[in-house]
Image (cartoon, grey):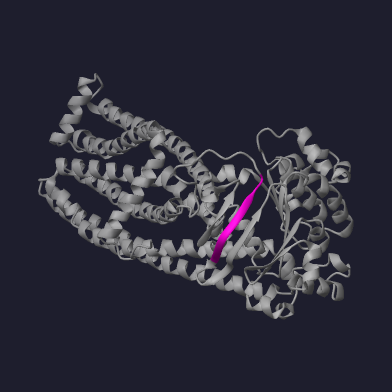
Amino acid sequence: MIEPDVPGQGEQRGDRRLTAWLLHWARPYTGRVVVSTLLVIGGSALQIVGPLLTAAAVDLYLRPRPEAAAVKVQRALAAMGLPVEGAGGLATLAGIYLVSLLLGALLQAAQGRTMMMTGQLVMRDLRAELFAHLQRLDLAWFNRTPAGRIITRLTSDVEALNEIFTSGLVDILSDLVLLGGIAGVLFALDWRLALVAFCVLPFMVLLSAWFRQRARSIYREVRTRVAAINTHLQEHLAGMSVVQLARAEARTERRFVEIDAAHRDINVRGVFYYAVFYPAVELLTACGLALLLAFGGLWTSAGTVSLGVLIAFLQYVQRFYRPISDLAENYNVLQASLAAAERLHALLETAPEISSHAALAPPPPRRGAFGFTGISFAYEPGQWALREVDFAVHPGERIAVVGHTGAGKSTLVNLLLRFYDPQEGAITVDGVDVREWDLTALRRRFAVVLQEIDCFAGTLRENVGLGRPGIDDARIRGALEEVQAGPLLARLPLGIDTTIGERGAGLSAGERQLVSFARALVADPEFLVLDEATAAVDAVTENAIQMALDRLLAGRTSLIIAHRLATVIGCDRVLVFHAGRLVEEGTHEALLVRGGLYRTLYELQLLHPADGSGPTASLGAYPAAAAPAAASDL
């Protein structure tokens, strides 16, 4: 939910809520925060000491006039046994001033280190929680959320929070303590001069309110523009080969320039507010000093205010207005952090649409059966991907699914693994509705090999085992051998310890597919799902995989989304989908004899093979008009 640009009661409540949420992350490090707070208070107190010592030195030794404050300082020094007369007293005050400066620097260094460490620890916890939460979100959320926007959350937004933990909150506390201390000392020294010094404060407050009304919306929009830049970069860097093959560099560059210009324009708007605010603060500061010099000079000449007190006031007022300016700058940091916190909080509050049932029954015994009963499903309302689908798969059966692109084949896998829930009907695995399964237990029983192969930067061992417990090197090597990846192992210089680059760099498409087969089989799953898994391999590699499949699929229930007829022929049953409906079902031979949609597909491949390989040509690209009239009506 986006809050209004003009701060009101609702936004103030939102700010308090976000501040409480930020402090929640610092709660495990309360001790560090307390220590840092004490250091801040000590450092601010030492900053107040200097002008007071200056006033005492002037009134006691340079232009003797025993003001009450100066006399109190002299008595305090005498009580500590320090010299207070003549040059010795002046040297004592100078020495205390120097010690206060050195001690203040040490406290500031200790406080800075403490909060920097605290900030890094908080950021570590937040990043870990964000990444863990992302892994719990359902697939539908990732499909509608650009990757660049997610990356912005975990990088730029988290870094904005790092600034407030390492400097922003502490600096604001330091400035507030310093302002309070100085105000108290000024009124204690002379209330008339204090009122003169503070007469410009209402204008400071109005100026800050004006700036605050505009800064929040600027920071929100800046973050949005940064996310758009990251999204564009991520998409086009990942698809650079497509951009270059299509000679689309100019169009891509123009689009990037447009996005970058929008980011520039919103920053220029922010620069305008800064350009007005900071000079205005300096002008008000100068006005306050001028008034203080005018009235203080008159009262000093009249003998009602000592010179030391006036000098102290001038020093204090400069120190008083500087924190106000710093508060404005730290307010910028706070606004950036609150804008980032708003986005991160919303992300962590995003609940997955698909989650485990509240009262979970124990996982049923492994039987190897699943079924679809009256399933209708749409990714978007009214656009049905599946309609009234019914079929059952028995233990140990090999089921092939064929149909044109968009017929609903991959949707079956998404529903079976419960990446989505159907709008109508029920899906059972080993006799239990998938909505009553624990998601981890359900998906652990399946191994899925997709057409798009994901390999990660790391060793071959890590890519096959994926860190799953109980999978040792022997099982990894055995799985690679079973999928006919022996030549790959022999080629790699370090075997399974060989490092694979990002996205499987260093491996051919066929080798990456073999790795994905080994990854799926190494956990000995109950069900095996192949989603056009041989589409990316050449004929030689496919033959090697086909030789392994008969051994690997023995005794295991399998759902094979077929891309090549060679896979379909060896299956127990073939399910033919068209326009989201199951229109034919039977063995390969029986469907050919029936002369329906499957026969049409088969003949189209024989007459117009996509790759010149006859029956092994792709089933995924045939004209919808080729389907029989009855199937089209369905």
Looking at the picture, tell me which residue is in the foreground, 314 or 554: 554
Q: Where, by quadrant of the figure, is residue 568 drawn?
A: bottom right
Residue 482 in picture, x, y percent from top left: 82, 43
- Residue 436 is left or right of residue 417, and the answer is left
- Residue 503 is left or right of residue 65, and the answer is right
Looking at the picture, tell me which residue is in the foreground, 215 or 1: 1
Looking at the picture, tell me which residue is in the foreground, 26 or 52: 26
Look at the image and say whether residue 369 sits in the magenta stretch.
yes
Residue 265 in picture, x, y percent from top left: 48, 71
Look at the image and say whether residue 37 sits in the magenta stretch.
no
Residue 5 in picture, x, y percent from top left: 34, 65
Q: Where, by quadrant of the figure, is residue 524 drawn?
A: top right
- Residues drawn in magenta: 368-378
Residue 308 in picture, x, y percent from top left: 20, 41
Looking at the picture, tell me which residue is in the foreground, 75 or 212: 212
Say which residue appears at 69% left-offset and 69% top-offset: 405
Looking at the figure, which quarter contains the N terminus? bottom left
Say which residue appears at 19% left-offset and 28% top-offset: 74
Q: In this view, does 599 lie above or below 93?
A: below
Say which residue appears at 21% left-offset and 22% top-offset: 78
